[in-house]
Structure formats: C-alpha cells, structure tokens
Amino acid sequence: MASRTLFDTIIIGGGPGGLSTALGLCRQSRTCLVISHKVFRNDGIEASHAVLGHDHIHPQEILAKARQQIDRYGTTSYAEDEVVSAKQEELPQWNGHKGFLVKSKSGQSWLGKTLVLSMGVKDIFPAIEGYKENWPQNIYQCLFCDGWERRDNNKAILAAPMGKGTMVPVMASMSLGMNKQKNDDGSSKVTILTDGAFNLETANFEPSVVKQLKGLMARGVKIDQRKIVALEDSNPTEGVNVRLQDENGKEEKLHFGFIMHKPRTELNGQDIIQELGVETEKTPHGDAIKVITPFQGTNIPGLFTAGDSGVQVTHVATAMVSGVSAAGGIVHYLNRLDDGDALAAAGLE
C-alpha cells in the first residue's frame, strides 16, 4: 500500500463541510486526511453570499483561507485524488477496532479510524435547451446565495415540474420580496413559468400551496403557461432570454434578470455510499444520507457525514455547521474508544 499511516479521520471532500470538520479536529489535535478532486457544486459562481464574514467573496478564496488556517495546526494532510472505494475493516494496529480502508482512482490507499463523507450532491438539469449553458450564471437555486444583485430586473420562477408539495410559491415570494416595484401594467416583476398548461383549481396541490399561489397572483405575480422552447444568454445584457411558444406555435422572447429553479439533486459518490451500506432517505429535492443528530453520525459506527449530502437546506454556512458538528461526533467517538482501550490495558474492564 502507498501509505500505512493510520489517520484519526479520513475526509472525502474538500469543500466547506469537509474543511470545517478538519478545522474542528485540529482543535483537538486529531490527525486527518482530506481527499478532494476539486470539483464543487458551486463551480462557476462569482461569489458566495450570506456567509458571515465572507459575504461576496469567491468560494475558492474562502476555501484557500480555510486551508491556511488549518495548516497552522500541522495535523491535516491533503490528497488531490478521486476516491473509488471505501470499506470498513478491523485494524490490528488499532487494537482490532474497525476502521476504514479508502482507495483512490490513482491507486493510492489510506487507513482511517473514522471516515467522513463530504462529497456533496449534484444538480440534475431538466431537458430544456440552454439550461446547462445558463447555470449558474443566470439560473439560481438559492436566493440567499444569488439574486440580490439583479433584484431590480424582472425575475422568472421555473415551475417545472409542478408537484404536489411544490416549492414554487416559496421561491416566488422570495423573488417578490427582493423588489416590490410594479411594472407599468401593474404586474409584479415576478413571472412563474409552468412550461405548459395547468389548472390551479384541478391541480393536485396541497391546499396551502393553492392558497399561496392565489395570494401571489393577487400581488401581481404572473403565471405564463406557454411551453419553453429555449433559454438564451442575453450577453452583453445581464440575464437570460426565454423563448416561449403558445398552443398555436407562435413564439415570443422574454428577458429576465435571472431564473429561479430548484432542480432535483443526486448524491455524489453513490457507489461508495452503497459499498459502505450507508442508509439514505428521501427529501423534497432528492436522496440524502440519513443523519443521526446532533453530531452528523450515520448507521455505520465511526462514519459521519458533512456538507450538502446530509442536510436539506444546502448552503455554505449550513455545510460549515454540519462539518464542525461531525468533528464533535468524531472526537467523542474516538475518546470513548481510547477510554475503553486504557481500561482494558489496565485490566479494569
């Protein structure tokens, strides 16, 4: 094996969640290895927002600063690689306790007493022409993260698909709250795009959703039921052009400062999650690792999660919180095992 160092923790993922875990472990002089192939969900955005002390700062700058602060402790190592396998096994060099063997795409392998899955999630884009090309510069999935800078423009909410417990009213309300100014025709600056006809009265919505949508319409929010033909970057003008087509085939192009849409997500590293036997659960947006609170534990002893893979509200700040919570769980877990080993060695068990 390339390395036989036994780390207190191996962290798969070098984003805010993983690095927050590493920093917490530093404060307890616990050794860890952070493995990252540096592909992040927020690649392409210009700045992170609503992160206390780091508002309007590029995410890579935040991560670079975090590494500088972690490095001063001297207990964290890094590997730029992609993990392809992780399994639990007994470690003779750790009194026979179960730890984790992690293998990478390049053929490296490492041993850890504990393991943190901080691989995040990926967004699954709808089959709309131009969607991928406008993400994330003109399509936003979180209005705490993006949108304020374009608050004075017309804004669109992509409501496809429009399910029973849809978040569309919440997204529309948030967009409306950014700027309550009306257009010349008295309508608001927010339009809900349904990408096809739907009937509010017969749709299979929860009563609260129907009430919210009616309230938004009363506030001037428009609902456009035409099919979306394509999304086009309106460069050099800020925003995106949406080509719409009615039932007669007539097309019209509308300009919006941004489109708000919460796409479905999938867990990264699903093969690793399945190999380890980690339990997952359904959320409104996709699967997530089932977390044992408050310390981000899982159904596997010694295995923790941090970042977007184990939270429903995904954000840099919540990823950081989950990371330091995982660090607390790891420290308590290792301390209990150390106590047990000491008792056994002294014959006091």
Image: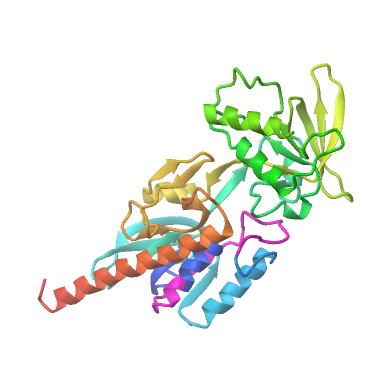
Q: Looking at the magenta stretch, what is its main secondary structure?
A: loop
Compared across the picture, whether 244 is left or right of 165 comes to right
Q: Is residue 206 visible?
A: no
Residue at x 24% of width, y 66% of height: 96
Residue 274: x, y in percent?
41, 46
Q: Residue 330, relative to residue 30: is it above or below?
A: above
Residue 69: x, y in percent?
55, 78
Residue at x 53% of width, y 79% of height: 71
Q: Residue 297, relative to residue 172: is it above or below?
A: below
Of 68 and 94, the residue lying toward us: 68
Q: Residue 207, relative to residue 84: is it above or below?
A: above
Q: Quadrant of the N terminus?
A: bottom left
Of 220 and 195, the residue lying toward us: 220
Q: Quadrant of the C terminus?
A: bottom left
Q: Is residue 27 visible?
A: yes
Residue at x 40% of width, y 48% of height: 290
Range drawn in magenta: 24-51
Compared across the picture, whether 157 is left or right of 229 comes to left
Asked if residue 190 is among those painted magenta in the image, a careful observer would answer no
